[in-house]
Image (cartoon, rainbow, N blue to C red):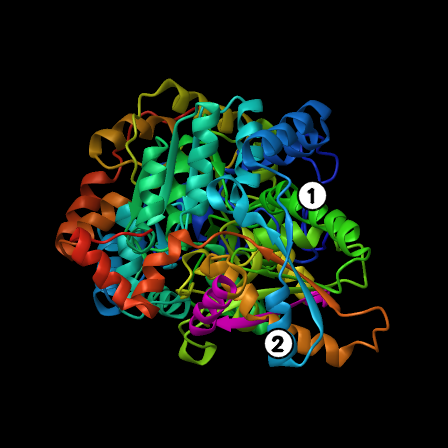
Amino acid sequence: MTEHTPQETRTAATEGRVARRFASLRAAGRAGLVGYLTAGDPDLARSRELLLAACEAGLDVLELGVPFSDPTADGPVIQEAMTRALSAGASLERALELAASVRARVDTPIVLFGYANPLLARLERDGDARALLDAVTEAGVDGLLVVDLPPEHSAPLREPARARGLDWIGLVAPTTTDARLRRVLSVTSGFVYAVSLTGVTGARLDPSDPRLQEQLARVRGVSELPLAVGFGIRSGADVAALAPQVDAVVVGSALVAAAREGPDALAARVRDLVPRPGPRPRV
Amino acid sequence: MSDKHEIPAGDDASPPLVGDFGRFGGRYVSETLMPAVEELAREWPRAWRDAAFQREYHRILRDYVGRPSPVSDAPRLSDDLRDRAGVDARVLLKREDLNHTGAHKINNCVGQVLLARRLGKTRIIAETGAGQHGVATATACAYFGLPCVVYMGAEDVARQSLNVARMRMLGAEVRPVHAGSATLKDAINAALRDWVATVRDTHYVIGSVMGPDPYPAMVRDLQRVIGDEARAQCLERVGALPDAVVACVGGGSNAMGIFAAFLGDPGVRLFGVEATGEGVASGRHAATITAGREGVYHGMRSLVLQTDDGQLQEAHSISAGLDYPGIGPEHARLHADGRARYLGVSDLEALDAMEWLARREGIIPALETAHAIAALPAIVRALQRESRARPDGPLRVLVNVSGRGDKDMHTYMQRRDPAALVMIGAREGGRRDD
């Protein structure tokens, strides 16, 4: 996986690890598993072990959560993970160190996932995004997803990030109008993250809800980017129900909960959730 | 529009970002909430310009809230300022404490619930700190017959038990929030999480001039009645505009409401008073303008109390209504532009001022309001220092008495009158808040 032909290297320079991973998933005929874990939960040393265990067990994309004191889009499981991480000294800097130590061992694409203020605080301090993005790329991070930076406000971070080849992952929700859908997609790269439900992370999801099918079809209709769906996906059955319609499923709270039992339990959970090859959506 | 916003050209479905205060403001919310926020931004200006909406809003303010609230002279406060500060000043009090429910908060709540009805929303949620906004929202919901859920930090539930009982009597469900510092910011987080899940049928009545656009502008518009009335009352009573307008600032709605009417009067100085708690140096304070830095929080770019890593810091104030680590973005701009000045008052100074106004004028102010009162000696001294000679009489200082102090009596007794606690305890074997 770490060996690249010259051809692949050229692709990598233009497309990045995320795109290559979705290409190889297509070739393998299965959906991918995007897994969220909070950086520094429960502490830095154990977080590193957990992140590696999850990647080595087969995560296709790692969403590395930057802890924030006031995570308003997250349910209780991830809120508590962030509180534990912050009490153990986690920060954006420590999250990047963790990313670097994961990158040193595995080629799993890493998306830094978080809230605006810890990133913008760094921008305010430095005067521009350069030093932050140097640190992000040096840590081997491949993309950014910032929950509370809608397209209207993301340019000061998004544009320099895109210029360096980092992906900017856009979120669309069940409430997203067609006009907003186009606006979000116009600034999205890597993959589109479709929020499965009107609610916070870890809420209860009915994968057979026809409104969800309709939402996924609507995004498909206007985007050729890989489509990931997340929020509320917790079981192999949820994954099996959704995998045929998407390019990846995102699991967050269920992995954060499994991580409480240690790296082995987490790895087992990841193996259990990785989608099997099966019918693929029409693109 | 500021250069921080990028609006793709030619997208008719997207109105420009209104209510954008220089580099402050904006709509920093997750995509789930964005359509609701855009709907509010579209519909609020329409409602506000609609004569029928205006008629209904002002009818309720008159017949139900009890507006206009009076302006009272405070002659004995004025005497004390002459004796203590050596300044000849006439203090005028805008009496929002006399509104139904006891504070300015009701002006905003009746307007927002009217708007929610117009938008077809069938459920109302709110956050509350001191409980005044929660009581006002519960009141407006009872008046309009809508179900109401109020999120309140568990710490504030304990500090403001009278208001908890009031909300419940009014038929609202009070949900204590135990996360984080268990105060106002955590109540807002919980309300936002509720709203993310219920946005299709629920309106979130934010209680201050904060949050994503259009809330800061909408709440200012709804509180502006304070300033419009006070400006006219002052002209009528004194024959001139005030030299200074003073209000306490947590999120900043009572201050924005009274300031708004004077922004076009360059001769009127505006003073916001924030809570320095146990002192800015102690780290236990809510002095956002003094000690905050620019950040993005609760949907807005404003000044925020935060660590170097961009984590929110817990605020502290004896007054639950000022116990918030952010401030409305329009205040951040007024501060940056120098149009308004902000100073700090400590817990102890606020307690002193509560007693001062009670004993000298017979008005028991809320602890929030007491911060504005406490700043008066410093403000009149500064005005006298800075102003040219005044042939036309004393300095005129208009203070917004944003709320009454009943809700704070337990806090007051604990800090200043333990004998009263003993008396009550002996008589009733329990705790009372009024």
| Nearer the observer, B398 or A10 | B398
- A46 with respect to B111 (left or right): left
Residue to which mark 2 is pinned: B378
Circle 2 SS class: helix
Disc 2 residue type (three-letter): Ala
The chain to which mark 2 is attached is B
- A30 inside magenta stretch: no
| Residue at the (36%, 38%) spot, across then down | B167
User: Residue B337 placed where, x, y %?
Assistant: 72, 65
The answer to whether residue A194 is visible is: no
Disc 1 residue type (three-letter): Val
User: Residue B284 placed where, x, y %?
Assistant: 40, 72
Sequence order check: which comes first, mark 2 or mark 1? 1
The chain to which mark 1 is attached is B
The answer to whether residue B177 is visible is: yes
- Going by the picture, which residue comes out furthest to the right? B391
